[in-house]
Image (tube, helix red, strand yellow):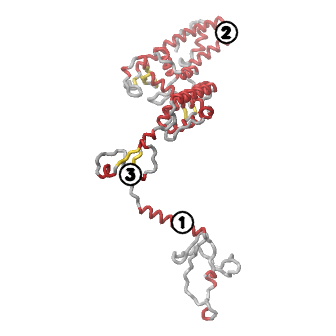
Amino acid sequence: MWLVEKHTGNIVDNTFHSLFGYTPLHDFKQRFATLKYIRDHEILSPDIKNKIFDVFVIYQKDLAVLNNVARRFKYAKMKHSGPSFDLIGNNLNELPDHLKITIAHLGLKYTFRVSDLINIINKSLTYREELFLLIQSIKNPYTNIEFTNANLFQIYTHIKRKTNITMPVLFHLYFTTWFDKNKFANKYEAIALDHSIQNYIDEYDESELVELSHTWIKTFKHSYRKFYKNLHIDKHYSRPKLVKELRPILKEYLISSHTLTSSVKYSAFTNACNLMIKLLNDNKNFGINTRHNDKRQILFKNLSHINKFSFNPNNEIYISVVDKFLNKQDEFSEFKYPNIIPFNDNIFIIRNYVNVTTSNNIQNIRNQNRTRRRLSYPEFDLTDSPDNVITVDASNINYNITTTLGRGIGMRRDHNVQYDDDDYYHDDDDDENISIDSF
């Protein structure tokens, strides 16, 4: 596409067309690379270079007008993503125009509340896992696809020029790096981490805050052990009250513990200590459990003579069993019958049997009281009488060469033979050979 007339016979126009005529209109990097080539060319005279530059200015101006017309045409034909609502469901039509912005992204129009976009930007630039900063790309919340640099620049200019909202510090620093995530992390990681830690305490649950509170108390006592060595938090002290009183202090303590800037570390720890000292001076009962004085001790009138332990006579209540329970004169809300669950005797018997049996087996093993059941054979009268001599077929005897000396020829146990449970008892720990002398 030609924005200036071709082949005018002028050397300037011909040179310009030969250099820029085949460069695509959207490739601005190639155009400026060609312009740099003309500037450094030694053959062209300075007058010709200046005239080429003048033509290039006209070319860029006409190209900008053409791009603007094309962009407006595409934006007019673009469809809206849907009804105009913010991220929590409020209708954006009732919102002033300067507090909302319409962005063209991937061929659709999206209308956002400016404050919602600021929250998305801050969350993305301060994203972390535990306390390790992992900066994320800023994405469209409806599609989870990254905004382009043009979209981010549009958001930046809208906040700066059309609203009275203070520009977020991290978004401004992100703009100075031309929305490059890696450059931003390398240059401003410490600042982003400090902003991230300030919001990190809001993600703690109560148990984690209580644990962090005790850690802070130990740190504070170590720093001011001369004045606050007796500082102690009662184990029955109200946990919600403890968290509420120490929350602003814990935020400063977290910053001092995890920041990468030494000056911020010192100032945050100093602020935390000053806030703690002010809290202790204003609240003398900090960490002391005062609720136990409100508990009342219930005593029975008929058994008052055997009551030898009195915690506080002012909190003692004497009641009559007959009046309160048997006659049911009125409700006594402070005393309730115990909730006793019936015990299952069968479970106890089974467990007791298993435990006793297991204990006896273990004790027998420790005492080496192992027994081997003898094999049942017909009884023979083994005397010296020739009539009582047992004749054994040598071909049916399995000879064991490894029989212990003195036992003679033994009978080796054959594992391939199946034995009945009533005739044979096998001990896994004893793998000796059974000889004829054992019977």
The residue to which callout 2 is attached is: 44
Examine the rendered structure and indicate whether residue 335 appears above or below residue 272: below
Disc 1 to disc 3, C-alpha distance: 36 Å
Examine the rendered structure and indicate whether residue 34 appears above or below residue 252: above
Place of residue 258 in the rendered image (x, y in percent of width and height, measured from the top left): 60, 31
Tell me, for residue 197, which label it has, or none: none
At horizontal 62% and vertical 13% (from top left) the residue drawn is 35
Which amino acid type is shown beneath numbered disc 1?
Answer: Ser
Observer-nearest of 134 and 102: 134
Tell me, for residue 359, which label it has, or none: 1
Q: Residues within 10 Å of mark 3 (few under 14, many from 20)?
A: few
The residue to which callout 3 is attached is: 338
Disc 3 to disc 2, C-alpha distance: 105 Å
Q: Quarter holding the C terminus?
A: bottom right
Place of residue 33 in the rendered image (x, y in percent of width and height, measured from the top left): 62, 17
Observer-nearest of 22 and 392: 392
Q: Secondary structure at mark 1?
A: helix
